[in-house]
Image: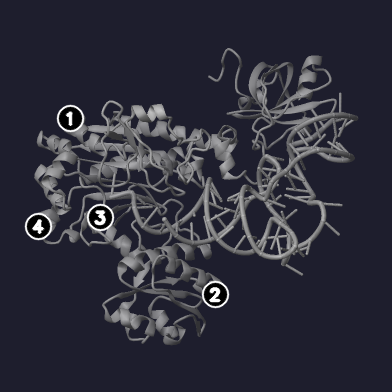
RNA sequence: GGGGCUGUAGCUCAGCUGGUUAGAGUGCCGGUCUGUCACACCGGAGGUCGCGGGUUCGAGCCCCGUCAGCCCCGCCA
């Protein structure tokens, strides 16, 4: 299959079975070892390395060219595959049983000295990320990056095949779309023919896929590129890829089943078969036990409510908050006594950074107690909290919205610092029963927790909670979580235009506003909308997790920096005056 | 928008308390070498110490500003 008119197969594909064959190969000079009378070339292509040996019996011109080859030059060789003598095999190389003795060797792609090395010595650090991005064509030659992108390809194909077998139709939706006033900042594209008007790049194909359901396509998917003009992170790029799905005549169970099938297939493709069904946890329970809506369930350590046990101990640090009705929550850390003073200080710093009031902690070593609130505790009081000999208790007090993120962070830090062994390698979970609204941190008014098309939970809708107590209203929204990472989220959508209008009203949107912004969706819902729901998987993140890459940038061929720049091609770049004029744009600086 | 870390040879890094001519490994160039696989050995070239300003008799090192990369908070329906 790898044969072309110029080669018989790839370098890395050669094996002992090819001994005696004449082959033609093309590849890059990975490394050259010139011993004088004999020259060895490690020739590299996407499949791997093979050793080309040019000895004294090789033709004169081959010897001359081989003697002067620079690294990363592209050459084509033609010659015989020869078994290496037993003591000269290289067991670290897939092709190490054999080597190629060329009778022809031509330079087809001369190369200047590479700005960053492709072949690295064992233990040599990677070049600075800035340089890796600037010289991306060289960085991508590295076998590790090639392997990442090969797996990415396989995962994409597997997702397509799996969904196709489930009778999902792959349908493309526009890249030039309508700006959305809510949510993330849009990337805008000026219209030349309509002065002062703009397209937006899609933050997701959300409304389009709902309209496809209205149109009767029943099951849709798309490997969709999405764009959000927000600040970046290690696991966030301004453009990213989602496996986007939507299906009709479904309930939550159906959607979770589809997504589980896809995720299980992807993990199998990545070499990690996983058990199904994934366990479920409610949002409330996740927040209570782990302080986050994306708990890492590989570890059992859970947050406990110690308010009653601690209330009588007279800890000054807790008293005033307790009188205001706050709770004391904490972690009973097995083996936590091993945490050093420095560890604890750093944990406290981390807690403060998250806006917490500070940490209270006690270490228990036999009858010996130490720590910031040790004098208020006894071994038996700690025992009642599940804190045994050699353990530690870490506590925070305050409103849940401040203690949860702190305890989440402390839990992760503690697990890492104590090198706690996970009880499972792969911990998937569904987080369900999310709230429909959350309070705006500044005004306290309801803002939607996800997007405004998420259906309220039917029980809460029937109980009238949408009007009486919007914050208690649950949503038919669900997240897929894996080892503490959010893989994606989805929901059952609102299909009743009246409910949709009611939700918009609760969000404080005027009816005219709603029509201007979401009229085309409402129009669709009025035209006979099937019950439908869907999901979107953050595909880049999946690839990152399955490759073990440390960053999204290592699984995207041409990623952006944290300042949203493309260093390779140099985007963004100023537009010329003629372009700006055609687009009716004046730039202020 | 805020906080932190980093920036010295093509690359990876060292550089003491501010002190003479800024070093190492690798790569590159030249040479020796017939079994290497990070070949070995000999020799050589290579520096805007990110950039700008300041302090000082003297700055790679201290101070201020700035740029870039990375990490985090805010943000990411």
Residue A19, position as x, y percentages in the image: 69, 21
Quick one: SS at disc 1?
loop
Q: Chain of mark 4?
A: A
Q: In the rendered image, which residue does mark 3 sit on?
A: A434
Q: Which quadrant of the rendered structure holds the C terminus of chain A?
A: top left
Label 4 to label 3: alpha-carbon separation: 17 Å
Residue A86 in sight: no
Give coordinates of residue A130: x percent, y percent: 56, 43
Marks 1 & 3, CB-CB < 8 Å contact: no
Q: Image height check: is A132 above or below A397?
A: above
Q: Quadrant of residue A405?
A: bottom left
Q: Are marks 4 and 2 on the same chain?
A: yes
Q: Is residue A316 above or below residue A213?
A: below
The colour scheme used to paint the residues is: one colour
The span from disc 1 to disc 2 (Cα, nearest Å) is 63 Å
Mark drawn on residue A464: 4
Q: Please name the residue that numbered disc 1 is placed on.
A: A215
Please check whether the numbered discs 4 and 3 fall on a single chain: yes
């Amino acid at each position: 299959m790898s044969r072309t008119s110029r080669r018989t197969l790839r370098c890395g594909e050669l094996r002992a079975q090819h001994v005696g064959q004449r082959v033609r190969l093309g590849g890059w000079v990975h490394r050259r070892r010139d011993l004088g009378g004999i020259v060895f070339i490690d020739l590299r292509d996407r499949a791997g390395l093979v050793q080309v040996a040019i000895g004294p019996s090789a033709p004169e011109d081959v010897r001359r060219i081989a003697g002067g080859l620079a690294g990363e030059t592209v050459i084509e060789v033609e010659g015989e595959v020869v078994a290496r003598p037993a003591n000269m095999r290289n067991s670290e190389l897939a092709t190490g049983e054999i080597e190629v003795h060329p009778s022809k060797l031509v330079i087809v792609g001369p190369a200047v000295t590479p700005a960053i090395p492709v072949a690295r010595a064992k233990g040599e650090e990677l070049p600075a990320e800035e340089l890796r991005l600037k010289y991306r064509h060289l960085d991508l030659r590295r076998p590790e990056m090639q392997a990442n992108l090969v797996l990415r390809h396989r995962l994409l194909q597997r997702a397509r095949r799996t969904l196709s077998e489930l009778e999902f139709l792959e349908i493309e939706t526009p890249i030039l779309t309508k700006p959305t006033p809510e949510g993330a900042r849009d990337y805008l594209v000026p219209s030349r023919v309509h002065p002062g008007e703009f397209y937006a790049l899609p933050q997701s194909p959300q409304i389009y896929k709902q309209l496809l359901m209205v149109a009767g396509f029943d099951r849709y998917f798309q490997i969709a590129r999405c764009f959000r003009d927000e600040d970046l992170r290690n696991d966030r790029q301004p453009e990213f890829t989602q496996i986007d799905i939507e299906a009709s005549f479904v309930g939550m169970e159906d959607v979770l089943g589809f997504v589980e099938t896809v995720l299980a297939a992807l993990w199998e493709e990545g070499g990690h078969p996983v058990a199904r069904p994934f366990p479920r946890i409610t949002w409330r329970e996740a927040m209570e036990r782990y302080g986050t809506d994306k708990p890492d369930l590989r570890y059992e350590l859970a947050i406990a409510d110690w308010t009653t046990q601690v209330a009588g101990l007279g800890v000054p640090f807790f008293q005033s908050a307790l009188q205001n009705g706050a709770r004391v929550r904490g972690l009973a850390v097995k083996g936590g006594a091993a945490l050093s003073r420095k560890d604890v200080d750093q944990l406290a710093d981390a807690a403060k950074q998250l806006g917490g009031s500070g940490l209270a902690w006690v270490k228990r070593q036999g009858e010996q107690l130490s720590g910031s609130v040790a004098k208020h505790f006894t071994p038996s009081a700690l025992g009642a909290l599940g804190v045994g000999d050699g353990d530690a208790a870490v506590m925070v007090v305050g409103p849940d919205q401040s203690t949860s993120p702190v305890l989440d962070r402390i839990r992760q830090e503690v697990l890492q610092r104590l090198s706690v062994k996970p009880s499972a390698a792969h911990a998937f979970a569904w987080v369900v029963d999310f709230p429909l609204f959350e309070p705006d941190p500044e005004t306290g008014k309801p803002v939607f927790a996800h997007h405004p098309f998420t259906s309220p939970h039917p029980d809460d809708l029937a109980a009238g909670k949408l009007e009486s107590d919007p914050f208690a209203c649950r949503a038919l929204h669900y997240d897929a979580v894996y080892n503490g990472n959010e893989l994606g989220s989805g929901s059952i959508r609102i299909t009743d235009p009246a409910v949709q209008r009611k939700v918009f009203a609760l969000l404080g949107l005027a009816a005219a506003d709603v029509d201007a912004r979401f009229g085309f969706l409402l129009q669709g819902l009025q035209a006979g909308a099937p019950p439908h729901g869907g999901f979107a998987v953050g595909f880049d993140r999946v690839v990152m997790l399955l490759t073990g890459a440390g960053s999204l940038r290592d699984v995207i061929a041409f990623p952006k920096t944290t300042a949203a720049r493309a260093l390779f091609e140099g985007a963004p770049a100023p537009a010329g005056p003629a372009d700006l004029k055609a687009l009716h744009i004046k730039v202020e600086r």
